[in-house]
Image (cartoon, helix red, strand yellow):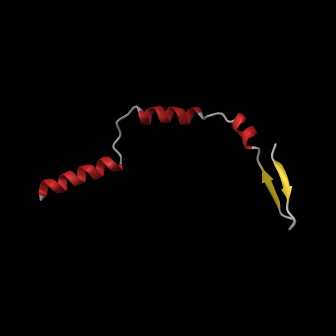
Amino acid sequence: MPEVVREENGRSDIMLNFEEELEKFQPSVDVEKVEDVVYNNNLTDVTDIVKELIQDVKGTL
């Protein structure tokens, strides 16, 4: 349960117990599925596009 801490100026802040929150954490199944698809596919990314552009430029010089 988060702890409410009151400061001298009357403002309230919530302090989370990091260890407690970590114990409650459950990874999202959807994220894991997407992660598997992304890692198991050879997808073109920006680096691949830049490399191809550089090769094209070198070939035209």
Does residue 47 appear to the left or right of 9 in the view shown? Answer: left
Task: Quadrant for the N terminus, please.
Answer: top right
Q: In the displayed structure, would residue 23 be above or below residue 12?
A: above
Does residue 57 appear to the left or right of 1 in the view shown? Answer: left
Closer to us: 42 or 12: 12
Where residue 9 appears, x then y in whole percent? 86, 68
The residue under the point 72% across, 43% down is 18
Where residue 29 appears, x then y in whole percent? 58, 32
Q: In the displayed structure, would residue 20 be above or below residue 51?
A: above
The residue under the point 34% across, 36% down is 42
Does residue 2 appear to the left or right of 26 in the view shown? Answer: right
Does residue 12 appear to the left or right of 28 in the view shown? Answer: right
Task: Quadrant for the C terminus, please.
Answer: bottom left
Q: Which image quadrant for residue 6?
A: bottom right
Where residue 32 appears, x then y in whole percent? 53, 33
The residue under the point 54% across, 36% down is 31
